[in-house]
Amino acid sequence: MSTSPTTTPAPDATEERAPALSPSRAIDFKQCPLKYRFRAVDRIPERPSRYAVRGTVVHAVLESLYELPSSERDVERAAALVAPTWARLLAQEPRLAEVLDDGDTDSFVAEADRLVRGYYRLEDPTAFDPQSREELVEATTADGTPLRGYVDRIDVAPTGQLRIVDYKTGRTPSTEREGAALFQLKFYALILLRSRGILADQLRLLYLADGEILTYAPDRTELLRFEQILAALWRAVSAARESGDFPPNPGTYCRFCDFQPLCPAFGGTTPPYPAQ
């Protein structure tokens, strides 16, 4: 893979953007419309989780790794980025320290270090330069559904073949859950199909903890069917945003939800719907 690396900075957290469907918010709405509201409309802060923060550190390390010349991207250099990356993120958002057990920075950094080293079981980062890292991709479908997301990495071969790559710090999903795992990458593939007119040749999930790779070759017909699913989902989201009706959908995942005190399913009181 070749072409010079580029990266798109994340927008300021306070920047107001027009509503759009992203992979994470699409999953939220399908799982629980009220959770979607609290995250996407009310934007209620949530407690940081160790799992999520560790993933953020690892993603940031791998993004920084590809800023180095290819000859310098060895495993020890990557591992050396972990501690300063964590320090930088912590300085930007001090409340991330809440994920530490009694302030035990060393064990947290060691966890991230193992995941970064695990990446080298899957790819040789000295062998190619990605086209982009953490790129904001956006598109509007033919029926007006706005799509938006950040892609971990896009690779383009000298032959023009395009690969979408996503890093996962969790465990490899079971065969039954592979479809759900690929939802995010299909979402990005559809955006690139609509924004660039290019059909991705490969979707690639790298599971750093297990050292496993899940690959998938999308086809245009499948992505067009997927587009219709997203369009129907966006219509439901838009109707809910207009009416303010976001019902809870209790399930096993509720035990991990920070919003229980605001959820009527748990005896909580939902705050007034913000003016739109």
Image (cartoon, rainbow, N blue to C red):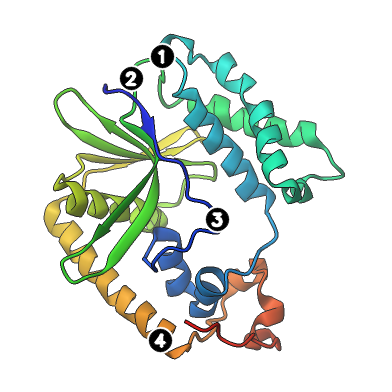
The quadrant of the picture occupied by the N terminus is top left
Mark 3–mark 1 distance (CA, rounded to whole Å): 32 Å
C-alpha gap between disc 2 and disc 4: 47 Å
Between the C-alphas of marks 3 and 4, the distance is 24 Å
Percent x, y of residue 104: 83, 38
State which mark lies toward you, 3 or 4.
3
Instruction: Give the foreground label among 4 and 1.
Output: 4
Q: Is residue 220 left or right of residue 117?
A: left
Looking at the picture, how far across and down is residue 246, in whole percent? 49, 84
- The answer for how far apart the CA atoms under marks 3 and 2 are is 32 Å
| Mark pair 4, 1: CA separation | 50 Å
Looking at the image, which residue sits at the far right? Answer: 102
- Residue drawn at x 58%, y 32% as measured from the top left: 115
**Rendered position, 158 above or below 72:** below
Q: Quadrant of residue 146?
A: bottom left
Query: Which residue is labeled 3 in the image?
Result: 13
Mark 2 or 1 closer to N-term?
A: 1
- Extreme front residue here? 15
Q: Which kind of residue does numbered mark 4 sit on?
A: Glu
- The residue carrying mark 4 is 242
Q: Is residue 21 left or right of residue 117?
A: left
Q: Nearer the viewer, residue 198 or 15?
A: 15
Q: Which residue in the protein does label 2 denote?
A: 128
Instruction: Report the residue at 39% width, 69% height from top.
Output: 19
Spot occupied by residue 179 in the image (x, y as percentages of width and height): 34, 57
Callout 1 crowding tier (Cα within 10 Å): few <14, some 14–19, many ≥20: some
- Callout 1 secondary element: helix
Query: In the image, 77: left or right of 266?
Result: left
* Mark nearer the N terminus (3 vs 2): 3
Q: Which residue is mark 1?
A: 70
User: Around disc 2, counting alpha carbons within 10 Å, would you say few (fewer than 14), some (14 to 19), or many (20 or more)?
Assistant: some
